Image: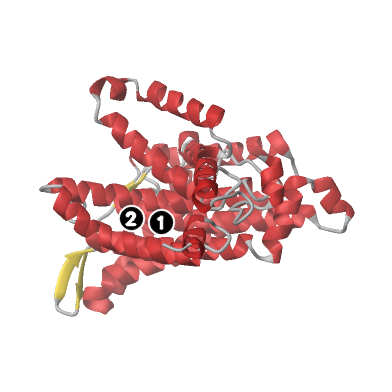
Amino acid sequence: MSISMRRRLLTDEDPKTLLAVATVVLLLIPLLFQVIFAGGLAGFHISLLTETLIFAIFATAFNLLYGYTGLLSFGHAMFVGVAGYTAAKTFTVLGAYLDVLGGLAPLGTWALAVVLGIVVAGIFAVFIGYLAVQLEEIYFALITLSFSMAIYAMANQDVPGQVAGALGIGDGNFTNRSDGLTFIPGDVSLLGFEFSLVNLTNPLAYYFLTVFVFVISVYALWRIVKSPFGMVCKAIRENPERARAVGVNVTYHQWMTFIISGLFTGLAGVMLVVLGGNVNPQDHVYWTASAAPVIMTVIGGPLSFIGPIVGAFSYEYIRWAISQFPLLEEYWEFSFGVLLLIVVLFFENGVAGGIDRFRDRFLGGEDESPAIDEADKETS
């Protein structure tokens, strides 16, 4: 392999080549799983990879706010929750109206759920973001956590259902409290083939759909961070006072970043909820759900675009590896905490920093192809 090809594959300056290769690999992986794993294990690992790709979108969207703008959100799961409940309601309420599509009804309902989930997440991001960006540092983190827990409490106590019931609208049950909403996406009939949109024993259909969404989302986020808007966001991260002094409207750019991050997080929320066929307050809105993208980003490296993606894979598969050993599984929080501590102490800019160092050795020098810009390296 030539030096130029290795450089294009191992850096995130222009990930189009890397993304193209990753897409081919992701499309071929199910065949590899079918060969390696027998019976239901292949389906399990495809489902695990599907979930990992969704969390990679979630973590990358979160890092747009954290790694590229310097704002730490402790409540980002609220967008997963509101988009997830929107998706569940789309399938349980609006899905019946799309039966006119025949065998394509589940796909049509999924597409509608994605659109509505993103729109609802965006509406919440607009109003919550406007209030949150008025504060800085730990106060920003705490207000996002406060909004997230407020949404958790409303979902857990079914406040929307109570309000609707008091107004004589519906049956007074909107979120189904702590049990959440469960639904089955249904079967698709396409070109003579019939398959379940989501089938955990044979999840190929939803896996390929997730690969498509993942590739489009990652490329869109990369274009955003490499745009003039993204450059301004990094300037704000490095020195907001100096950015403000040269005429940048810091609050406005932080607000816009919050909204964009919320939109992509809402997309991840819809994909995650449809995969599981259930949305509930504990798993999708509670503060522990907001910790997942933070941990993934720290593990992967917030100063590299591919860092959160690497972190999502590391988090999910380290968690799976721990589950294979009963003693480690019994104390998995401790086991995972030790691994996280090792990454924080010995890996500069997380696992992505380790990849950068390997790349530098592989290419024969640091200056040939930096994966992180100079401002990022100075910060790290």
Q: Nearer the viewer, residue 62 or 99?
A: 62
Question: Would residue 15 be found to the left or right of residue 91 on screen?
Answer: right
Report helix, strand or loop for mark 2.
Answer: helix
Give the percent coordinates (x, y) of residue 115: 45, 67
The residue pinned by badge 1 equals 270
Give the percent coordinates (x, y) of residue 163: 49, 48
Callout 1–callout 2 Cβ contact below 8 Å = yes
Alpha carbon distance from label 1 to label 2: 6 Å
Report helix, strand or loop for mark 1.
Answer: helix
Where is the N terminus found, in terms of image quarters? bottom left
Labelled disc at residue 274: 2
Please identify the quarter of the rendering in which residue 225 is found. Answer: bottom right
Q: Nearer the viewer, residue 139 or 149?
A: 139
Residue drawn at point x = 44 percent, y = 50 percent: 56
Question: Which amino acid lies under the numbered mark 2 shown in the image of this protein?
Answer: Val
Give the percent coordinates (x, y) of residue 263: 54, 59
**As displayed, is residue 377 above or below residue 326?**
below
